Amino acid sequence: MLSFAEENYLKAIYHLSEQTGESVSTNAIADTLNTKAASVTDMIKRLSGKGILSYQKYKGVQVSEKGRKAALQVIRKHRLWETFLVEKLKFNWDEVHDVAEQLEHIKSPLLIRRLDEFLAYPKYDPHGDPIPDENGEYKSKPQVPVSSCDVGRSVIVVSVQDDSPEFLQYLDKIGTYIGAKIRILDKVGFDGSMEVQIDNKKTVFISREVSENIWVTD
Amino acid sequence: MLSFAEENYLKAIYHLSEQTGESVSTNAIADTLNTKAASVTDMIKRLSGKGILSYQKYKGVQVSEKGRKAALQVIRKHRLWETFLVEKLKFNWDEVHDVAEQLEHIKSPLLIRRLDEFLAYPKYDPHGDPIPDENGEYKSKPQVPVSSCDVGRSVIVVSVQDDSPEFLQYLDKIGTYIGAKIRILDKVGFDGSMEVQIDNKKTVFISREVSENIWVTD
DNA sequence: AAAAATTTTTAGATTAGACTAAATGGTATA
DNA sequence: TATACCATTTAGTCTAATCTAAAAATTTTT
């Protein structure tokens, strides 16, 4: 049984290792969790001792198979709660993250099974991210960042890669949501920003950073 | 802001002081929380420092007005979550306590407001206990234990004073639930047990302990 | 390849919350 | 009223999780 802190570390490390595909550095973990490298080293040792991570001094960590399964269960809980908050309690998609961060640590297999059933077995959360099932299986839709799309294409928003209120409120403002249609009008070589039209209505410029965090499909 | 442990102590102390009406002893707290007197003394000091309890060495503790308000908010959350689990997630009334014990510590005023709304502002939880509102107000139905009812009377079950799975499963077995009709057939002077008929159907003997934990109204 | 810079680990402290054992206060009894 | 007993508090230890400062390992630069 993992503590709250252990689960938070595991989740962060799992996400980092998924992004990079490589072993994860102490400093990278410290940065994403806003803690210090020394604290990370301590926790790495504890999680290695539990068989959740594999670790060699100075060489970074990898998530073990056991760790991967545990991480996916925490992610499952997080995304189910986010779905509950939006679908049933009428939260906006920018209000759910912090609450789900707390709810994901509740220990009750029955609760999660019943919540899943109550929500009619959702496959994706409000940010478009796939919800793993009880066995950790999930299928993600084929998707690419807007930043990699050619001028002239029309695409559909599938997910967002940043869950911060600031980013999500900005997306609300420009009329973007999961399922919105985006047409690429122009790309600016200078700073990588793009001109796009959303749902055949508003035409806006989005920065490189924004276009990298909106993922789309044809 | 109180920690999980602080909230648990406060809730236990509040309940004890409501039951007895007097100041609460260190050992009584240790007993209900399954911890040791020394730990309780530590926590009492911490909560006194925060103005939640008032305390004189060797004289027991009382809950301050500030503490009462905080306790009622934790109780509100606990009972709303229990209601959610039974009404929406189809938990049995004997399955909710431990999960609600965890959920009650989630910090999010918005969440609780929305949950309350989603449940249509329930006034009582699945065990018949009143749910305090945002201001800590609640109204409990006038009620007495079955043990105090005279032979011949017919009464309605309003609440149960023990939330343990063992007790609640026993009540299920003898066909008792909130709203059930109980007719007092006989009282045994020897051990205080009673013969009662439930919903004009089953006739059973219940022990003194059981009859003290079922509360009823006319 | 040596020096410099950076990253990571170790050592030692801190806080919350728990414990045991010992000391002290309060109460009941002879 | 003195003693014995029980309740409570204090003192000291432990673990999880954090921190800072210093030491060690690795990587980068010259």
Image: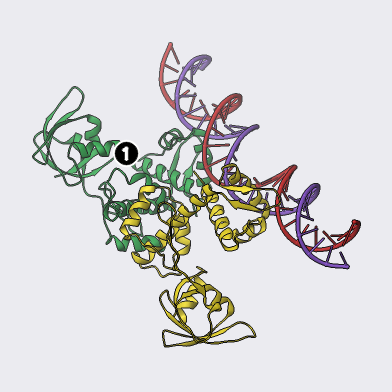
Chain colours: A yellow, B green, C red, D purple
Density class for disc 1 (Cα within 10 Å; few <14, some 14-19, many ≥20) is some
* Residue B203 image-quadrant placement: top left
The type of residue carrying mark 1 is Ser
Q: Is residue B70 visible?
A: yes
Q: Nearer the viewer, residue B173 or B127?
A: B173
Question: What residue sits 29% from the left and 49% below the top?
Answer: B91
In this view, B13 is above or below A111? above
Which residue has dot 1 on it? B164
Which image quadrant is residue B23 in? top left
Exactly how many numbered labels are in the figure? Answer: 1
Give residue D10's position: percent from left, percent from top. Answer: 60, 34
Specify whether B41 is left or right of A156. Answer: right
Residue A130 in picture, x, y percent from top left = 44, 63
In the rendered view, would you say A11 is above or below A189? above
- Compared with residue B157, is residue B84 higher up or lower down, i.e. above or below? below
Badge 1 element: loop
Residue in the picture at 28% in, 60% down: B119
Q: In this view, does B73 lie to the left or right of A75?
A: left
> Is B57 left, or right, of A79 in this rendering?
right
Quadrant of the frame with the C terminus of chain B: top left
Residue at 45%, 87% (x, y): give it. Answer: A202
